Image: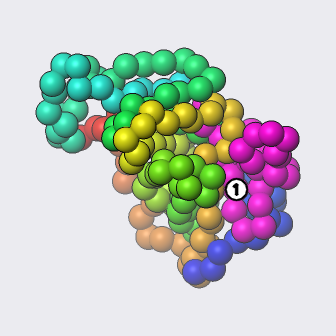
């Protein structure tokens, strides 16, 4: 399994792997996004679900309630201290059958105590990626919509998998918008 270069990422983007696709990294007073040497820096859309404890709900991945979130359409999401928010990528991804994608946070946010968490994008998964932003600081933290928030790294296997995400009808297949946990 080897990491794929900007050349490969551009080639696959022409086949619909990333839409919309930004050819080169953009950064004029913003947090960069677009293709890099060995990855793709994705943007967060202006659609957020900010965690709140107003309803004193218990966080239960088997019985998750939307009442734990406040929804906001905004260019700047403010995450309360020691809390988190969910967002989604601007980009829609279609992962090839012989590729696994890992996501890492951008250093600009990491240096501010903001952690981006995403599980791997499995072979033949497609959709908008739901992003989790943890504010590990005791202060409110900002996330800027339509700017770079994380980098996706593409690893090509030496052979295709027997069963892909699409084959097993994964529960998050084709997700659009910010998607909450499903059982």
Q: Nearer the viewer, residue 78 or 37?
A: 78
Could you say where residue 157 lies in the image, as x and y percent from the top left? 57, 76
Residue drawn 28% across and 38% down?
182
- Residue 93 in view in this figure: no
Q: Quadrant of residue 111?
A: bottom right
- In this rendering, would 102 be left or right of 90? left
Query: Along the horizontal axis of the image, is 170 left or right of 74?
Result: left
Please report the residue visible at 54 percent of the width from the left and 18 percent of the height from the top.
73
Q: Is residue 41 magenta?
A: yes
The answer to whether one can see residue 82 in this image is yes
Give the position of the C terminus as an image quadrant: top left
x and y percent of residue 26 in the render? 82, 46
The picture quadrant where one finds residue 22 is top right
Secondary structure of the residue carrying numbered label 1: strand
Looking at the image, what colour scheme do you see?
Answer: rainbow
In the image, taking residue 77 as reference, residue 163 lies left or right, namely: left
Figure check: 133 above or below 74: below
The answer to whether 169 is drawn above or below residue 152 in the figure is: above
Residue depicted at x 62% and y 33%: 144
The quarter of the picture where the N terminus appears is: bottom right
What is the chief secondary structure element of the magenta stretch?
loop
Density class for disc 1 (Cα within 10 Å; few <14, some 14-19, many ≥20) is: many
Q: Looking at the picture, tell me which residue is in the foreground, 171 or 152.
A: 152
| Magenta stretch encompasses residue 42 | yes
Q: Position of residue 43 (x, y in %)?
A: 65, 41
Tag 1 residue: 40
Magenta region: 17-46
């Amino acid at each position: 399994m080897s990491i794929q270069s900007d050349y490969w990422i551009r080639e696959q983007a022409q086949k619909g792997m990333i839409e919309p696709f930004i050819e080169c990294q953009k950064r004029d007073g913003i947090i960069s996004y677009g293709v890099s040497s060995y990855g793709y820096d994705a943007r967060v859309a202006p659609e957020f679900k900010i965690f709140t404890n107003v309803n004193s709900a218990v966080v239960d991945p088997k019985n998750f309630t939307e009442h734990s979130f406040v929804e906001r359409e905004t260019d700047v999401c403010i995450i309360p201290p020691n809390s988190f928010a969910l967002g989604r990528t601007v980009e829609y991804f279609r992962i090839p059958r012989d590729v696994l994608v890992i996501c890492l946070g951008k250093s600009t946010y990491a240096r501010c105590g903001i952690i981006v968490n995403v599980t791997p994008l499995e072979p033949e998964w497609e959709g908008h990626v739901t992003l989790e932003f943890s504010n590990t600081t005791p202060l409110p933290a900002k996330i800027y919509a339509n700017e770079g928030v994380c980098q996706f790294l593409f690893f090509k296997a030496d052979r295709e998998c027997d069963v892909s995400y699409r084959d097993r009808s994964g529960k998050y297949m084709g997700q659009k918008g910010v998607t909450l946990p499903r059982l």
